Image: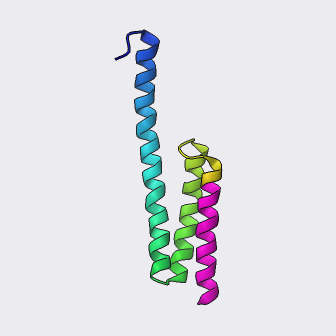
């Protein structure tokens, strides 16, 4: 347990930030899952729509600092690649 006033404040801030990060990451994982489910169903239109909704959320998660910007870029790139492969095959 922290004894200094500044350390106690830091603990409070860390707890709040942890909750924000978890919320942001959870939202991001949900939209990524929807894209992947649409890809598994071989539904190109649904996958494309889900991807359009997912990209801003993934990028916003990176801007807020919950994930690294290169991690977000990699996620977007891989999802886009899979959706484009599905659309090309259909």
Magenta segment: does it hold 87? yes
Question: What residue lies at 46% left-to-right and 79% top-to-bottom?
Answer: 40
The boundaries of the magenta stretch are 72-90
Q: Position of residue 48 (x, y in %)?
A: 57, 75
Residue 69 percent coordinates (x, y): 64, 49
Q: Please report the residue visible at 59 percent of the width from the left and 60 percent of the height from the top.
A: 75
Location of the C terminus by quadrant is bottom right
Q: Going 54% across and 62% down the picture, which residue do you hit?
A: 54
In the image as oriented, which residue stretches furthest toward the bottom?
90
Left or right: residue 81 versus residue 12 is right
Query: Hey, which residue is sitting farthest left in the picture?
Result: 1
At 46% from the left and 21% from the top, the residue drawn is 10
Question: Which quarter of the picture shows residue 56?
Answer: bottom right
Residue 73 vertical position relative to residue 80 in the rendered view, above or below: above
Residue 76 sits inside the magenta stretch: yes
Instruction: Say which of 57 and 7 sits in front.
Output: 7
Q: Characterize the magenta stretch by its predominant secondary structure.
A: helix
Q: Is residue 5 above or below residue 36?
A: above
48 relative to 13, above or below: below
In the image, farthest residue toward the front: 1
> x, y percentage for residue 39?
50, 78
């Amino acid at each position: 347990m922290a004894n200094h006033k500044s350390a106690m404040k830091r603990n409070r801030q860390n707890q709040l930030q942890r909750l924000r990060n978890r919320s942001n990451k959870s939202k991001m994982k949900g939209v990524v899952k929807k894209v992947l489910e649409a890809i598994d169903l071989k539904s190109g239109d649904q996958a494309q729509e889900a991807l359009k909704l997912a990209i801003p959320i993934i990028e916003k998660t990176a801007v807020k600092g919950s994930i690294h910007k290169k991690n977000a870029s990699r996620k977007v790139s891989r999802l886009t690649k899979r959706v484009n492969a599905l659309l090309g095959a259909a």
